[in-house]
Amino acid sequence: MQDEEGLADFCRDEWPRLVGSLSLYVGSRELAEDLAQETLTRVCGHWHTVAAAESPSAWAHRVAFNLAKSHGRRVGAWTRAQARIGAGAITSVDDDRAAALVVHDALRALPDVQRQALILRYFVDLSVHDTASAMRCPENTVKTHTRRALEALRASGLVDDDEPMAEEAG
């Protein structure tokens, strides 16, 4: 019974973090909700492993980003197939607010690993250690990806030069 309550609490607490980080990552809240739901389904199926993990949140986010990447590959294959048969690519805008589009565009322009590091560190608020666990890389690699992502955002004007972000350089 206590194990079920722990799972329910985890899912309730993690849902908004997953949806938010995935929205930033994929640029679509609807897709983010679908991916978050699939992630929490997998958490339920592996709860004993997740609960025993050093950072259950990092475990869940690793699964979520892997699902997002798989979805991106499927969409890319579909888009290429449509282009080959002449149907053209289908595009949609999920959010009409200009500021949100600018942020999404800037994040999408970052290399995948930099985008992941930035979202996990500053949106999900994982520690460097937990981000490294989620990304399956050394902590210094997380710091490097985060620093490079922030440099790119500064160059695009989204982050002020005089506003240092915690632990960005190490």
Image: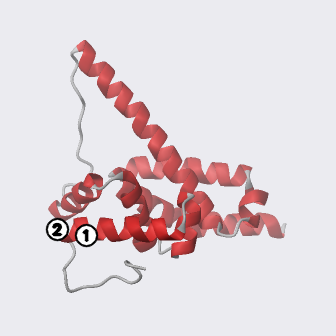
- Residue at the image point whose x is 64% and y is 49% from the top: 41
Q: CA distance from mark 2 to mark 1?
A: 6 Å
Q: Quadrant of the N terminus?
A: bottom right
- Residue at the image point whose x is 20% and y is 86% from the top: 162
> As shown in the figure, which amino acid type bears the numbered disc 2?
Ala
Residue 23 image position (x, y, % from top left): 38, 56
Instruction: Say the numbered circle drawn on residue 161.
Output: none
Looking at the rendering, which quadrant does residue 137 occupy?
Answer: bottom right
Looking at the rendering, which quadrant does residue 6 occupy?
Answer: bottom right
Residue 71 image position (x, y, % from top left): 45, 39
Q: Kindly tell me whether residue 36 is visible in this rendering.
A: no
How crowded pointer 1 is (Cα within 10 Å; few <14, some 14-19, many 20+) is rated as: some
Q: Give the camera-side residue of 144 and 94.
A: 144
> As shown in the figure, which amino acid type bears the numbered disc 1?
Glu
Left or right placement of residue 120 versus residue 158 in this view: right
Instruction: Say the numbered circle drawn on residue 155.
Output: 2
Residue 117 image position (x, y, % from top left): 43, 64
Mark 1: which secondary structure? helix
Residue 115 image position (x, y, % from top left): 36, 59
Mark 2: which secondary structure? helix
What kind of colouring is applied to the model shown?
A: secondary structure
Q: Quadrant of the C terminus?
A: bottom left
Q: Which residue is mark 1?
A: 151
Is residue 93 placed above or below 157 in the rendered structure?
A: above
Left or right placement of residue 39 versus residue 8 in this view: left
- Residue at the image point whose x is 37% and y is 60% from the top: 114
Q: Residue furthest top?
A: 85
Q: Mark 2 and 1 residues: CB-CB less than 8 Å, in contact?
A: yes
